[in-house]
Image (cartoon, rainbow, N blue to C red):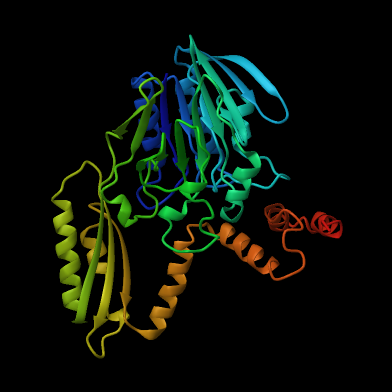
Amino acid sequence: MRVAIFSDTHLGFKAFGREQESFENAEQAFGIALDNKADVILIAGDIFNEVTPSTDVLVGAFQLFSKAKTSKKDIKIGVSSKKQVIEEIVAGIPIILIHGNHEFRGKDYTNVLHLYSKSGFAFYLHAETAVLEKGNEKLAVHALGGVPEQKALDALKLWNPKPVESAVNILLLHQNFKEFSPVEDEMVATLSLDDLPNGFDLIASGHLHWTVKQKLGKTTFLLAGSTICTQMKKVEQENRKGVHLFETQAKTIEFIPLPVQRNLFYHKISFEEAKPEQVIHKIHEAIEKDLKEGNALPPLIRLKLVGNLSKGISLSDIDLKAVEEKFRGKAIMSVSKEFSTTAFKKKIAELRQIQQSKQSISSIGLSILEKNLKETDFNDAFEVKRIFDLLAEDETDKVSEILSRRKK
């Protein structure tokens, strides 16, 4: 069988001049899968950019998934969990989804991915295994959706997936890993590559937006990457967006980049006793060089300005309005001015700490709640994510009920 794998489409992502880009890139990803005659499509989480997408975004996803549903291919698929086993013949190419941190909700609320599963457009799995059969071939996809990083290792051990005999086995995840994390923090990653179970032919994970492929003994580990750049990270500069095609017989992986995608340029420019005109000149120089690379789409340009300014010069003296106006429509820019001033250093440190956490604002709030609970006698007495979601929805009565019967 041929398996198409991609992740982090972030449908509904909105940024100036890029409102349709998430859908355009996702459509290219589906096109690559179909053009290369994939038998199954795996999407490793963060399909959507918001927990509760707008109606337009939901409809757009239906249109994307329908491309696979109308393709002529019949695969027998059985989905097994602790609750039940379901077997059916799928019309079209089956799409298997897991939730990412952007879709993750507590058990009191319905995950948006259930909508596509219930309507027959995709299979949404969490701590479940789908076994697909095509002729004499058998493929087992073991899927665990994203969980809060602090609980990731425990969740994987609790589920404890086992490879299916006489089948090619793929483990699908959506988590961070210590090996790829910029800081040592249990809220950023508790999973290590060494924690991954043995016996799988391929372990693929979403969440991180760049691509990595490496061998772990007989297993191939794959970071699927994203189909859209949302944060302009340096590691993505040389990392194209695309689709991975896994051949179950040969155990090979081919990467096919999206035909149309933006270039990303990342610059860290250092200054010493700089004057405003010197800073502006360097910015112009970097941008104009990037534009010479040429692309159908305006590039993403991330400029990180560091060092110090001349005595008597403040950050407010570095006016970027003229630069933005000059390159409007030619490039999409993000500029951070990290020059040495005490007050600004403090603000930058706070922002960097948030950025390194790789979490949404709601995830940061959840992390703070978890850390604070560790200092109380509640600790792990209840499911923190559930309480957090209920509080966010003003369900205080239900929270009081749960806390009153907390675990001993």
- Where residue 365 sits, quadrant-wise, is bottom right
User: Residue 99, image x and y in percent?
Assistant: 56, 40
Q: Is residue 391 left or right of residue 252?
A: right
Q: Is residue 51 above or below residue 407?
A: above
Q: Is residue 56 above or below residue 325?
A: above
Quarter of the image that includes the C terminus:
bottom right
- Where residue 120 sits, quadrant-wise, is top right
Residue in view at x 34 percent, y 84 percent: 341
Image mark count? 0
Q: Nearer the viewer, residue 386 or 87?
A: 87
- Where residue 55 sits, quadrant-wise, is top right
Residue in view at x 41 percent, y 22 percent: 248
Quarter of the image that includes the N terminus:
top left
Residue in view at x 45 percent, y 12 percent: 72
User: Residue 197, image x and y in percent?
Assistant: 53, 39
Q: Is residue 130 above or below residue 407?
A: above
Q: Nearer the viewer, residue 366 or 142?
A: 142
Q: Nearer the viewer, residue 187 or 265?
A: 187
User: Residue 104, image x and y in percent?
Assistant: 60, 46
